[in-house]
Amino acid sequence: MSRIAIIGAGASGLVCAIEASRKGHNVTLFEKNSKVGRKILATGNGKCNISNEKIHLERYHGESPSFAKEALRRFDTFTCKAFFRSLGLEMREGEEGRLYPMSHQASSVVDMLLHEVRALHVNIVLECEVTKIETKDAAFVLHINEKTDIFDACVIATGSVAMPTLGSSDSGYGFAKSLGHSVIEPYPSLVQFVCDEPHLKEVSGVKMDANVELYIDNQKCQSVQGDLLFTAYGLSGSAILDLSRKASHALVQGKSVDVVLDLLPNLSREALTSLLQKRLSVAKDKSLSLWLEGMIPKKLAHFIIENTKIAHLKEASALGVKEIKKIVFALKALRLHVKATKGFESAEVCAGGVDVSELDAKNLMSKKIANLYFCGEVLDIDGDCGGFNLHFAWASGYLVGQSL
Ligand SMILES: Cc1cc2nc3c(=O)[nH]c(=O)nc-3n(C[C@H](O)[C@H](O)[C@H](O)COP(=O)(O)OP(=O)(O)OC[C@H]3O[C@@H](n4cnc5c(N)ncnc54)[C@H](O)[C@@H]3O)c2cc1C
């Protein structure tokens, strides 16, 4: 039996603690927050999109995403369900293969994990920030609250810097660097866009199914159809989060980022033009905004009128071919400049992290220091929206726990 230190009682650290304890190790779990799994509680808007029926390597990114292959093979969706069922948690399937706890509550996931770590007599040390890790005679000396403690193996499960209000920090990257590891510079992913458009406030709160094209330095590089939410600062919604990794990376590199929105993706330009022309028959005595309101949300109607600069036309019946063209263009190809993302403060995950080429993919152990392991989001592996990030956290924690 070895003395194992796991730093971070988040998704990956909790699963790692369970597996390592099940193997008979003496496990201590250090957590700087006053409770375990704080970020898990915030996932999926409190419902926790725990995993996905369609876990596939293609949904993961980083300098070397194939590194995740072994972790995902050992902990596939079937194993994930079996693992949580062994804790007493049932799952249900939502749209696009997304898996959630049957209770609809993220707290059920944390409660089941916590119950199991307690039942396995894991030593859980809360409100305890590990500040330094040193190696001494093949052991690890952890500095905690001005004291030190010695362990045979050390697992860094500290997560990323995404959303620091939930307790995230860059300490994992610092530990990695101090122990001779490289860190790929992190940048925010699954994050909202800040746009340069003075009238966005007026359309704030409008949610639509839209097709969003991403342009980097004027080159179209990705297109996604899904939820789009206008906000006072810019754009949010699942379509934006899906595009955000590439956009965020481009912004970090100083490139120019734009999006082109098709707000009525199920109508071709021709069909929309002919619909607008037909609707001129009901335009009499109607203001432009009231006439447009027959087709699109009221706030969006005002926005389109401002954007197309046709407000001087008092009545919809005054619309000519030129104005109809402008409306079609604004609804089918609205171009907005993205000046920034909402940053780490609002990001769901970080791209970048500990360089996986310096770790063994079979067990996530350091190639530089024996018995030093990394799991979860601290690694340079990040997933798409849809349960892929939590799944990798569970899978990597599981792999390390089983390898100890
Ligand atoms: C708002 C939000 C919603 C999300 N929704 C989803 C979703 O629905 N589905 C999905 O798949 N993913 C989702 N994610 C992403 C997912 O939550 C993370 O990828 C996952 O939690 C990462 O697990 P982890 O164990 O690596 O890190 P974390 O869960 O962040 O755990 C790391 C832990 O380490 C602790 N820690 C850090 N440094 C120290 C230290 N020095 N000493 C002691 N303790 C330390 C932290 O306090 C933290 O508790 C969401 C993220 C956010 C922010």
Image (cartoon, rainbow, N blue to C red):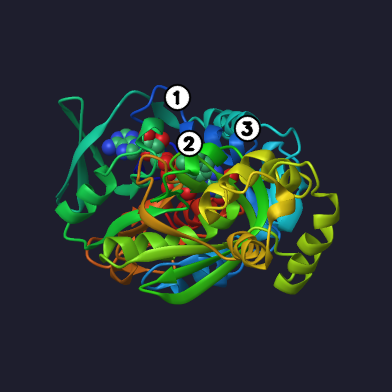
Q: Say which mark, if any, is on residue 171.
A: none
Tell me: 284 left or right of 263: right
Are the two marked residues, 1 and 3, in contact with CB atoms closer than 8 angstroms? no
Placement of 156 over or under 144, stated as above or below: below
Q: Residues within 10 Å of mark 1 (few under 14, many from 20)?
A: some
The secondary structure type at the circle numbered 2 is helix
Q: Residue at x 30, y 26 (%)?
A: 128
Placement of 112 over or under 333, stated as above or below: above
The disc, 1 or 3, on the residue closer to the chain's N-terminal end is 1
The yes-or-no answer for disc 2 within 8 Å of ligand 1 is: yes
User: The residue under label 1 is which amino acid type?
Assistant: Lys
The residue lying toward the viewer, choosing from 174 and 206, is 206
The secondary structure type at the circle numbered 3 is helix
Distance, label 2 to label 1, CA atoms, is 10 Å
Query: Mark 1 = which residue?
Result: 35
Q: Position of residue 13 (x, y in %)?
A: 44, 43
Tell me: 206 left or right of 396: right
Quarter of the image where one finds residue 181: bottom left
Q: Position of residue 182 (x, y in %)?
A: 21, 63
Q: How many marks?
A: 3
The disc, 2 or 3, on the residue closer to the chain's N-terminal end is 2
Q: Residue at x 60, y 42 (%)?
A: 302
User: The residue under label 2 is which amino acid type?
Assistant: Lys
Q: Residue at x 62, y 49 (%)?
A: 313
Are the two marked residues, 2 and 1, in contact with CB atoms closer than 8 angstroms? no
Q: Say which mark, if any, is on residue 39.
A: 2
User: The residue under label 3 is which amino acid type?
Assistant: Met
The yes-or-no answer for disc 3 within 8 Å of ligand 1 is: no
Tell me: 16 left or right of 278: left
Query: Mark 3 = which residue?
Result: 112
The secondary structure type at the circle numbered 1 is loop
